[in-house]
Image (spheres, rainbow, N blue to C red):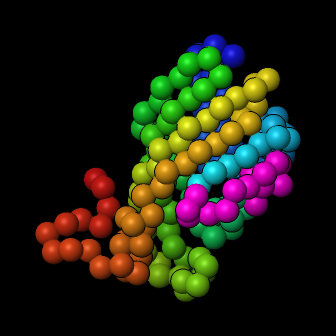
Amino acid sequence: MDADAVRARVSELFGLWNGGDLSRLADLYSVDFEADYRPYAPIRHGLEGIRAMLENARGSFPDYHEDMLDIICEEDRAAVRLRITFTHDAPWGPLPPTGKRVSYEELLMLTFRDGKVVAQRGIVDNLSVLRQLGVVSTPPGQSAARD
């Protein structure tokens, strides 16, 4: 894939995550897929791994939404900075719903093979999420979210 094809494929991935259409998983993700968000989450493998990630996000936060802020593409790879927003209106792990609106950033590295994502590495601003949900206090004079 050239950089333009990678960019187009990343846009399709955002459409999948924002719309939740699980029928497109096998079109966009390899059966050899691996997601690494350590230490936040365990490594996920294959189509079932990405399905579990998507179902968790959409099931816990029905209004879950991703916006692409920056993207750098090259042959078979992309680096993406994105903003994720949702309302915490369902249980999330041990946290009961707070009804709070959350907005945070993630850095994402994607590797493609044969037009499908084979590797996804994410760095998530979990501290911002925990601050916005009131789990961790925000120091005086600081904002819980990036503007």
Q: Please provide percent x and percent y for residue 131.
A: 36, 73
Give 81 or 42, whichever is nearer the viewer: 42
Residue at x 21% of width, y 74% of height: 139
Estimate the x, y position of residue 34 in percent, counting from the top left: 73, 46
The percent coordinates of residue 49 (x first, y second) are: 78, 55
User: Does the rendering let one see residue 117?
Assistant: yes
Give the image quarter of residue 146: bottom left
Relative to 30, is 10 on the left or the right? left
118, above or below 95, in the image: above
Image height check: is 31 above or below 36? above
Q: Is residue 43 magenta?
A: yes
- Residue visible at 62% across and 63% down in the picture: 41
Residue 67 visible from this viewpoint:
no
Q: For this view, does 113 lie left or right of residue 131?
A: right
Residue 140, relative to residue 70: is it above or below? below
> Does the magenta run of residues contain 41?
yes
Q: Nearer the viewer, residue 135 or 44?
A: 44
Residue reaching furthest to the front: 39
Quadrant of the drawing holding the N terminus:
top right
Residue at the (59%, 55%) spot, across then down: 37
Q: Nearer the viewer, residue 93 or 65?
A: 93
User: Compared to 138, does 9 lie above or below?
Assistant: above
The residue shown at (76%, 31%) is: 116
Given the current orientation, which residue lies at the most extreme top position?
A: 2
- In the rendered structure, which segment of residues is drawn in magenta? 38-52
Q: How many marks?
A: 0
Please tell me in which quadrant of the rendered image residue 70 appears.
top left
Q: Name the foreground residue: 97 vs 6.
A: 6
Give the image location of residue 39, x and y in percent. Answer: 55, 62
Q: Residue furthest left?
A: 141
